[in-house]
Image (spheres, rainbow, N blue to C red):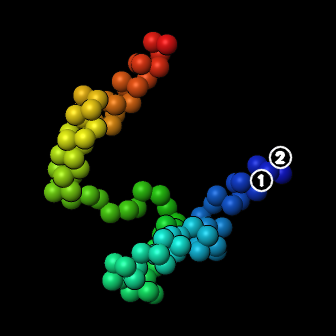
């Protein structure tokens, strides 16, 4: 019961906003920013507005690029036209064993 209470409290937005540095990518930024010519004072928070699903939408061009890459790599190797289709294939294969 005590562990459950801790997990529930620490997985809430209030806790994450209060401890934002524990949920950002600062180690990655420190390693890559100089090499990429990015400013050293940039932020990389994952805790944004306090709600889920508020991120930016992918552009049609990006969706087309991702679809093309999928077909050229994963699709070519597995025959799956999408991630959802790949999961169905995987589930079917697992159930055959």
> Position of 65 compared to 28: left or right?
left
Q: Which image quadrant is residue 54 in?
A: bottom left
Vertical comparison of 92 with 51: above or below: above
Q: Position of residue 58 (x, y in %)?
A: 26, 58
**Gap between marks 2 and 1 measured at Cα:** 6 Å
> Position of 82 compared to 24: left or right?
left
**Residue at image coords 49%, 13%:** 97
Q: Position of residue 96 (x, y in %)?
A: 45, 12
Residue reaching furthest to the right: 2
Q: Is residue 45 visible?
A: no
Q: Which element is circle 2 on?
A: loop
Q: Position of residue 42 (x, y in %)?
A: 43, 83
According to the picture, the residue beneath numbered tag 1 turns out to be 5
**Residue at image coords 20%, 41%:** 72
Residue reaching furthest to the top: 96
**Residue at image coords 49%, 67%:** 46
Q: Which image quadrant is residue 75 in?
A: top left
Vertical comparison of 3 with 10: above or below: above
Disc ID at residue 60: none
User: Circle 1: is it few (<14), some (14-19), or many (20+) Cα within 10 Å?
Assistant: few
According to the picture, the residue beneath numbered tag 2 turns out to be 1
Q: Which element is circle 1 on?
A: helix
Q: Position of residue 36 (x, y in %)?
A: 34, 78
């Amino acid at each position: 019961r005590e562990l459950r209470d801790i997990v529930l409290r620490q997985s809430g937005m209030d806790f994450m906003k209060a401890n934002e540095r524990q949920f950002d990518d600062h180690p990655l930024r420190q390693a890559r920013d100089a090499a990429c010519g990015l400013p050293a004072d940039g932020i990389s928070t994952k805790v944004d507005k306090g709600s889920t699903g508020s991120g930016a939408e992918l552009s049609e061009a990006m969706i087309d690029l991702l679809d093309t890459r999928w077909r050229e790599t994963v699709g070519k190797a597995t025959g799956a036209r999408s991630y959802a289709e790949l999961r169905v294939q995987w589930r079917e294969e697992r159930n055959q064993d």
